[in-house]
Amino acid sequence: MAITAQLVKELREKTGAGMMDCKKALQETDGNIDAAIDYLREKGIAKAAKKADRIAAEGSAYIEISGNDAVLLELNCETDFVTKNDQFQQLAQDLAKHLLAAKPANVEEALQQSFQGGEDTVEAFINSNIAKIGEKISLRRFAIFNKTDNDVFGAYIHMGGKIGVVTVLEGTDNEQVAKDIAMHIAAINPKYLSRDAVSAEDIEKEREVLKTQALNEGKPEKIVEKMVEGRLNKFFEEICLLDQSFVKDPDQKVKQVAANHNATVQSFVRYEVGEGIEKREDNFAEEVMSQVNKK
């Protein structure tokens, strides 16, 4: 029978599953709603949908490198315990391999792609793992990198996946210096590669703040401008990778470390798991008391 939009909508409301999953379930069951619900439950998709409102702020960063391509991803779950689960780690690896092969533009596109050429989408594959692992799991973000044979990737995973960094160095095959710079990025957390990457608006805003600070300190207005420029250099050193003192040798800037190997830092991405996600703060004592009071 024809699968109408209304039928898909009804199944979505009953299961919370995604539109494409509902459409496929109805096609597989010839439009039978009850059978489609069972189909989704068997696939673990309906069960996964019920977990959708949970907060997944834990997880792991994962890096996969294949030739001249690399990917850094963040896979989230609800508890730190699950990140040590072999199945969770395998899921991260499987997703990374898919991303390298398919090269989607964003997470939304990735989720709707066919997983490894099979019938299931990437989203359905993740949902099937949710059903087995028992926690909400989500592919939060990823970055894909490309290089030439004359360049090198610097890859570093910190604290078992709490922080992941990939950097690309042009003009060298020295993996150790690339990894050292990736470790620096993990530790210092620069916001930009270079001064050129900082917007004129942000620079002007910082300049005004520094000028006001100097005037409030009672400095003569005629020397304030020179003071501001000096402090602005300090501002760049704090946020721009190339201007930072190298963590393993503070006497050198990061750009000098790269130049010592006839290299330049082309790009980098740093993921810290859970950054920007508002974590739920549970009060265990209150939770227990609330359960006691219900009895």
Image (spheres, rainbow, N blue to C red):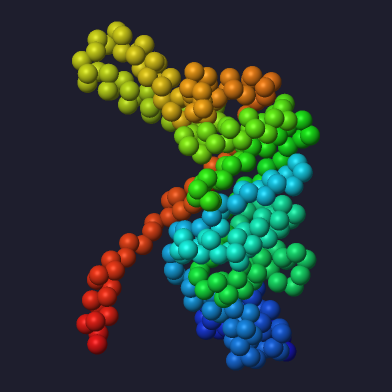
Q: Residue at 32% of width from left, 65% of height from top?
A: 282
Q: Is residue 117 visible?
A: yes
Instruction: Identify which residue, 278 or 77, lies in the foreground.
Output: 77
Measured from the top left, where is residue 104 in percent x and y? 69, 54
Measured from the top left, where is residue 71 in percent x and y? 66, 48
The quadrant in which the N terminus is found is bottom right
Q: Is residue 180 left or right of residue 273?
A: right
Q: Is residue 117 left or right of residue 135?
A: right
Q: Is residue 191 visible?
A: no
Q: Residue at 48% of width from left, 37% of height from top?
A: 187
Instruction: Identify which residue, 185 or 197, lies in the foreground.
Output: 185
Please say if 114 is above or below 215.
below
Instruction: Identify which residue, 214 or 61, lies in the foreground.
Output: 61
Please say if 103 is above or below 25.
above
Measured from the top left, where is residue 285 in percent x and y? 25, 70
Q: Residue at 66% of width from left, 82% of height from top?
A: 25
Q: Residue at 64% of width from left, 71% of height from top?
A: 124
